């Protein structure tokens, strides 16, 4: 894989975003404000989120960026959710400060966006060939003054669809031509 200068710069920014998250942690632990496991957990949540923000700013809009941001946010949410569940199963917070009721709320709050991320990433059933390979594609405008709609592409039959008033429609040919 060869990288252009622009791509190298982006990698540097990604790395910098991650290290900014790490920077203030050592003094916090030394001051006794937090334990290392708590800090590491925080990092595992904060770093992917920071990278998602960087990706939003740096990567050019498109399906790759959508997937990248969703994956990073998904990682962050999954770590937070896993931590909340293990604390809940362990019967309390790291210092006993978190009640099981509070943790249950945290789990619910994290679970909802995470489910949405996974539902977005997971292939849906294709209306054309009914295989579960329908993935979100780019956006398009169904009419001159209409809002942008999400297009979907089937990985099996390569059919392209969009949802109109709750029903799947085949993509209009002229839109398909202008998009791809
Ligand atoms: Zn299909």
Image: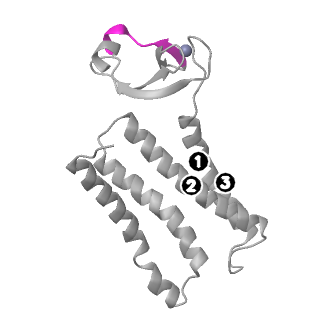
Looking at the image, residue 86 lies above or below residue 98: above
Disc number placed over residue 108 in the picture, else none: 3
On the rendering, which quadrant does ligand 1 occupy? Answer: top right
How far is mark 1 from mark 3, CA to CA?
Answer: 10 Å
Of labels 1 and 3, earlier in sequence is: 3
- Label 1, on which residue? 114
Residue 101 in view of the camera: no
Quadrant for the C terminus in the image: top left
Residue farthest toward the front in the current orientation of the protein: 1
> Which is more foreground, mark 1 or mark 3?
1
Mark 1 CB within 8 Å of ligand 1:
no
Residue at horizontal 67%, vertical 63%?
A: 84
Label 1 neighbour load within 10 Å: few <14, some 14-19, many 20+: many
Residue at horizontal 71%, vertical 61%?
A: 85
Query: Quick one: SS at disc 3?
Result: helix
Q: Are marks 1 and 2 in contact (CB under 8 Å)?
A: yes
Label 2 neighbour load within 10 Å: few <14, some 14-19, many 20+: many
The percent position of residue 12, horizontal first and vertical second, equals 30, 59
Looking at the image, residue 159 lies above or below residue 55: above
Residue 139 is a magenta residue: no
Residue farthest toward the top in the current orientation of the protein: 173
Of labels 3 and 2, earlier in sequence is: 2
* Along the line of sight, the residue nearer the viewer: 56 or 111: 56
- Label 2, on which residue? 77
Query: Quick one: SS at disc 1?
Result: helix
The magenta-colored residue range is 167-175
Q: Are marks 3 and 2 in contact (CB under 8 Å)?
A: no
Query: Quick one: SS at disc 2?
Result: helix
Label 3 neighbour load within 10 Å: few <14, some 14-19, many 20+: some
């Amino acid at each position: 894989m060869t990288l252009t200068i622009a791509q190298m710069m982006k990698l540097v920014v990604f790395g910098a975003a991650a290290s900014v998250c790490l920077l203030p942690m050592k003094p916090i632990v030394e001051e006794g404000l937090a334990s290392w496991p708590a800090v590491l957990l925080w990092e595992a949540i904060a770093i992917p989120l920071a990278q998602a923000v960087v990706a939003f700013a740096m990567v050019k809009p498109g399906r790759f960026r959508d997937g990248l941001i969703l994956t990073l946010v998904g990682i962050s949410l999954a770590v937070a959710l896993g931590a909340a569940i293990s604390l809940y199963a362990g019967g309390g917070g790291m210092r006993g400060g978190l009640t099981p009721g509070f943790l249950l709320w945290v789990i619910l709050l994290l679970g909802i966006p995470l489910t949405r991320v996974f539902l977005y990433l997971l292939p849906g059933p294709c209306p054309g060939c009914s295989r579960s390979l329908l993935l979100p594609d780019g956006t398009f405008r169904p009419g001159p003054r209409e809002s942008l709609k999400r297009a979907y592409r089937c990985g099996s039959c390569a059919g392209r669809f969009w949802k109109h008033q709750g029903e799947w429609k085949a993509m209009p040919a002229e839109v398909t031509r202008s998009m791809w």
